[in-house]
Amino acid sequence: AQSVTQLGSHVSVSEGALVLLRCNYSSSVPPYLFWYVQYPNQGLQLLLKYTSAATLVKGINGFEAEFKKSETSFHLTKPSAHMSDAAEYFCAALRYNNDMRFGAGTRLTVKP
Amino acid sequence: DTGVSQDPRHKITKRGQNVTFRCDPISEHNRLYWYRQTLGQGPEFLTYFQNEAQLEKSRLLSDRFSAERPKGSFSTLEIQRTEQGDSAMYLCASSFPVTGISNTGELFFGEGSRLTVL
């Protein structure tokens, strides 16, 4: 089964600073990859997805992620953090017609 | 609102009782998934349906857990003889199957049903 590893369970940045959340997947065949965001006591909301159409993917709220096959990575970035970005972020991978597997999550804290 | 809805949002029960959660997916979606999420963890896959057929079940789904989707629309997840370790958020999601660029399998989640077993 596809596995996803998120490096760093907690990331803290200052407002206006760069956000970098790391995700690596393990597979010989690049899956479809996703980033979801979860606010407290809510379900998960899709931020962006990689489907092999383009390696740099832009999502909502100013986030983007770059697929790097050589590094089996799909890191999430945002140039300037806002207080409203504080949430839990999950990387996920989907193999064709299989279930979606999630990483353990990274909690993003934004300091004023 | 035409998103995924789950009921109840919160359930507190005593150990040994049975509980049932309901999920109403987005009506056009033929795939429906159940996940379990504990504090500080990512969602863990439990099971999924394509229409009314249950296609895969996780090892996490012990014989106390049963899920149904009788008419290929809403689904129920029942936990019998609940244990304190069952306390978690139970998430439902729906999607189209992966067919290519137009349908890439992304899941649309409900708000979740939080279970507390005392």
Image (tube, coloured by chain):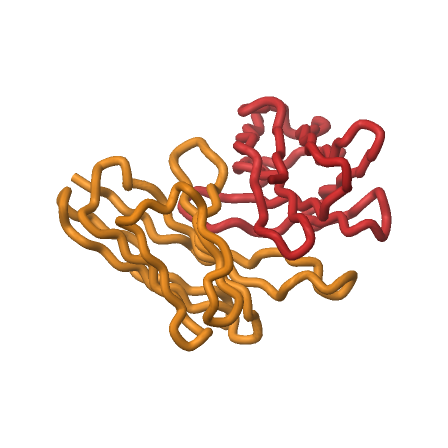
Chain colours: A red, B orange
Q: Quadrant of residue A56?
A: top right
Above or below, B68 relative to B112? below
From the viewer's side, name the closer residue of A71 and A43.
Answer: A71
User: Is residue A56 left or right of B87 when viewed as pictured?
Assistant: right
**Compared with residue B54, is residue A73 higher up or lower down, i.e. above or below?**
above
Can residue B4 be seen in the rendering of this structure? yes
Total of numbered circles in the picture? 0
Residue located 50% across and 59% down the image: B55
Q: Quadrant of residue A12?
A: top right
In the figure, is residue B4 to the left or right of A6?
left
Q: Is residue A95 above or below residue A112?
A: below
- Residue B53, percent from left and from top: 47, 67
Where in the figure is residue A36, as x and y percent of width and height?
60, 45
Tell me what residue is drawn at x 24 percent, y 43 percent.
B116
Please state if B73 lies on the left or on the right of B77 as rendered: right
In front of the other: A10 or A13? A10
Q: Quadrant of the C terminus of chain B?
A: top left
Picture coordinates of residue A73 (x, y %)? 75, 31
- Residues B102 and A1: in front is A1
x, y percentage for residue B79?
26, 52
Any part of residue A78 in sight: no
Relative to A67, say whether B12 is above or below: below
Q: Residue at x 55, y 59 (%)?
A: B108
